[in-house]
Image (cartoon, rainbow, N blue to C red):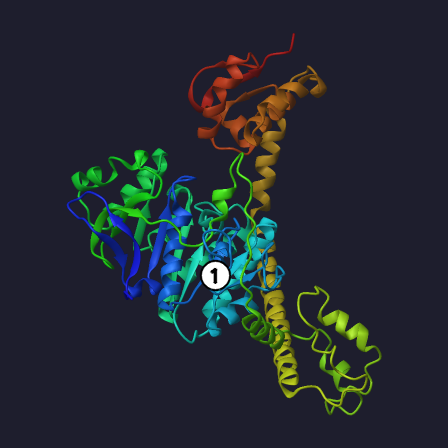
Amino acid sequence: MSNKLIMGQYREGGRDGTFSLSRDAQVQTFAVIGVRGSGKTVCATVMAEEMCKQGLLWTAFDPISVWWGLRAKKDGTPGGFPVLVFGGNHGDIPIQKTDGRRIAEVIAHENVFTVIDVKRESKTFWHTFMTDLSLGLMDQEPDTPRHIFVEEAPEFVPQKPQSDLSKRTKDAVERLVRLGRNQGYGCTLIGQRSATINKDVLSQCENLFALRTIGSHDYKAFVAWLESAGLEKDQIKVQLKDLAKLPDGTGHFWSPHFAGEFSKVAIRYRETFHPGETRKVGVAAKSVTLAPLKEVVARVQKRLSKTVALVPGPKALQGEGGDGSLRKVPSLKGLRHQIYRDGSLTSLIDSVEEAPPKIHPETLEELERLRRENASLKADIRRSTTAIREITAKLEGVRKSLSPQYKALHSLFSEIGKTDGQVDPAAWEEWLKKAGGRGCRRILEVMLEKQTLRAIQLATLSGISYRTLKNYRGWLKSNGLVQIEGEGEDATFTLIPLA
């Protein structure tokens, strides 16, 4: 058996024969980019198949539910690779949104290939789980190296995070990609568009599979990547000339340091079941049977059960004597409900008699650790509260020192631009809606109140810069809303009454 990862065949470029990667690919960073249907997921799953053959452990975070197919043969019968599936319709073990760190411990210390299928879950679930998983992996010291595949990478390392949760996820995954190799993790990011992947994260991927790509922004992202790899402009043009016309499964492999090559390659077909091939109009879904992994599932469930933190505090569990006994627990059923309210694990208490003799020492140690952590958090809150009070006092001092200037400016602007006529704001409601943006709307609102102002006065009262005002004057004038006389900051803006 070859000790290489056999990925496919070379195409053009003066090279012929088998295209393969060395076993060290397990701890390398890759990006697999291509439009929908170009073969990017096939490329990644072929790499995973080859890692299975070599006994190189990996985990796939799968929001599109195609990786579970590695557990079955190409025709859907049992006999693929021994892949443990968390979550999804084909999962061996169900998961909850907060299970990321517990699964990270399993990944780091169990010798098993794993898929985390989250297609049925919300994007909030995806981000929360992926954040905890990435941070949890970095907290662990894995027994042997692991490779992490991340489908839909732009969702987790976006160029422009849209929320605090999205930013936390991006930071966590970026840390895994950037520093993971120090702890034995490699990583592959899989996505449709390179332009939507955070550039700092993409730059950490030292190896790139570029399949069919169409967008101009994605083209520019590839150019930037190749320039950082040391290619000259003429070489880059040659590498990218056919990027938009590449057939399915064919792409450019750029690896300046790990493999030391820039080659055009055709990725081989999957040897395992590919769910995506049956998701076509007029093609009936295949019946798929996964081979059982009873021993693996039992072992993993046992490990997961040991990582559960009990909800009740130490006193509630120890009884009056504090010796660890459960003599005074009023409702064992209620206690079980608090610990396993998500129903995802087999209860540790189901097998205990009504009066269990003692709490396990490891449980008491965990409770003590949580109590110390709680005390530390309270101390942090007290320090933060003190700091906030100090900052508030400083801000109050600044407010008082600026009060004379504020009053002078307020007096100045409260008197300027007033006219004897009255404007009915209701009559202007439609134009206020059309103004749309906050800056333009504020300009109209100020004009409705003052009716005549110099440009610099209008900008100041509207809370915008003079430069921003210049961007809106054309719209105001072309729509016949204001009359503008003069130029520059002294130009006079006069509201035109509605007909």
In which quadrant will I find the C terminus? top right
Q: Residues within 10 Å of mark 1 (few under 14, many from 20)?
A: some
Q: Position of residue 20 (x, y in %)?
A: 27, 57
24, 412: nearer the viewer: 24
Residue 121 located left or right of residue 220: right
Q: Position of residue 471 (x, y in %)?
A: 46, 25
Image quarter for residue 299? Answer: bottom right
User: Looking at this view, is 83 or 228 the one in front?
Assistant: 83
Residue 417 in view (yes/no):
no
Residue pictured at 44% horizontal, 75% vertical: 141
- Give the residue drawn at x 63%, y 74%: 305
Q: Say which amino acid is labelled 1.
A: Gly
Q: Is residue 245 above or below residue 184?
A: above
Residue labelled with disc 1: 79
Residue 311, x across and y down, in percent: 71, 73
The image quadrant that residue 48 belongs to is bottom left
Left or right of 176, for residue 123? right
State the SS at label 1: loop
In the figure, residue 52 lies in which quadrant?
Answer: bottom left
Task: Report x, y in % for residue 3.
Answer: 28, 66
Q: Residue furthest right?
A: 330
Q: In the rendered view, would you say 49 is above or below 243? A: below
